[in-house]
Amino acid sequence: MSGRVKLGIIGCGIAANDLHWPALKNLSDCFEIVEVCNRSPAKALSFAKLIGSSTGKEPACSTDYQNILANPEIAAVNIALPVELNAPVIRDSLRAGKHVICEKPLAENLNSAAALLDLEKNFPHQVAMVAENVRYRRFIGRIKELIANGSIGRPYLVQWRHLTKIEDDNKYAQTSWRKNHVYQGGFITDAGVHDVAALHDLLGPLELLSSFSDCVNPAIGSTDCMMCHFVSQSGLHGSLSLGFSVVAHEQNQLIILGSAGTLTFEHNLLTLKKADDSIHEEDLSDDWGFEAEFRDFYQAITQGKKPHSTFAKAYADLAFILACTVN
Ligand code: NAP
């Protein structure tokens, strides 16, 4: 298969408008958005108009995703819905013969995610991937390169602190499906699963040794604070601290300590410090991986290759973060 892939978008909320569309706009050689769907018609219409104002061709609109699935012209769907709808919509989409890219986390709980892993085996000729954009960020590849070429010697400790304050009027916290969430783990799952995906890509499978989680501000969900201790298969120990109701302090910093140097990544800046006090800095700004993620989806469809962000990896990310929220 080659040429532009005809795409349907299911869910026209924040992710579709603010994160997916800017990437898809730059990939007009890969995708043609043929139809969009949203529960409330006004959001579907305004999203269709936004796309049409740029492409000159407004996609069709609907409020029922079955219309997209019944459209034989559409080869692939992009799912950006409340998390608890991922499983049924992925299932219906694969059964309708569509290639699927679905926002993270894979499902609302681990049983549901496991059922999707079983389901996808029945559709070996369709792409099934999770839109875990962090897997496509520049810092991941660069850190792996620096570790592999011995820049910091033997890595022995990893620390990630992701501390921020999600105000009650934050646009994500305002979505009703997050406020009254039925998916497990609240903000820790919704946002923290990205950090786990990055750690998995950097370090490989992780064994959870201990964890603590709590709810500081129930207005943003059941769990907004978490700390865990893990070990990688190569014996590297690490900790991940997540706080989404932190007062008067913000920090999103990854530190990797090695026998011959230290790597930090913060605000898109990668810093390598060596024993001779030399400091090397690299700006690794990117679009948070969205364009690369959709390009991977396109290449998986047109070249029949496995995408980088598979259901199996998303399952492992979800399993880890959910295990951290069980005390
Ligand atoms: P959102 O703004 O609430 O968007 C979800 C949309 O789905 C809403 O517009 C909602 O319409 C629509 N919807 C609900 N039920 C539907 C149905 N049965 N059929 C069609 N449309 C339906 O939430 P969001 O922030 O975009 O999050 C959506 C997904 O993206 C989640 O999986 C989230 O985890 C993910 N996300 C990822 C990132 C990232 O960095 N990768 C960032 C943000 C979100 P109504 O409002 O009319 O109900």
Image (cartoon, grey):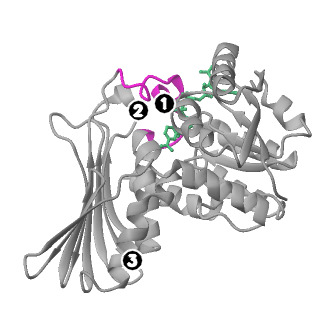
Judge left or right: residue 47 versus residue 227: right
For the record, the magenta segment spans 169-186
Tell me the amino acid under the disc marked 1: Arg
Q: Which residue is mark 3?
A: 145
State the image coordinates of residue 73 (x, y, percent, origin top left): 89, 40
Q: Which residue is mark 1?
A: 178
Q: Residues within 10 Å of mark 2 (few under 14, many from 20)?
A: many
- Out of 294 and 70, give the one closest to the viewer: 294
Q: Are marks 2 and 1 in contact (CB under 8 Å)?
A: yes
> In the rendered image, which quarter contains the N terminus?
bottom right
Identify the residue shown where x is 65% and y is 63%.
307
- Out of 4 and 235, give the one closest to the viewer: 4
Marks 2/1: CA distance? Answer: 7 Å
Tell me the amino acid under the disc marked 3: Glu
Q: Quick one: SS at disc 1?
A: helix
Q: Which residue is mark 2?
A: 221
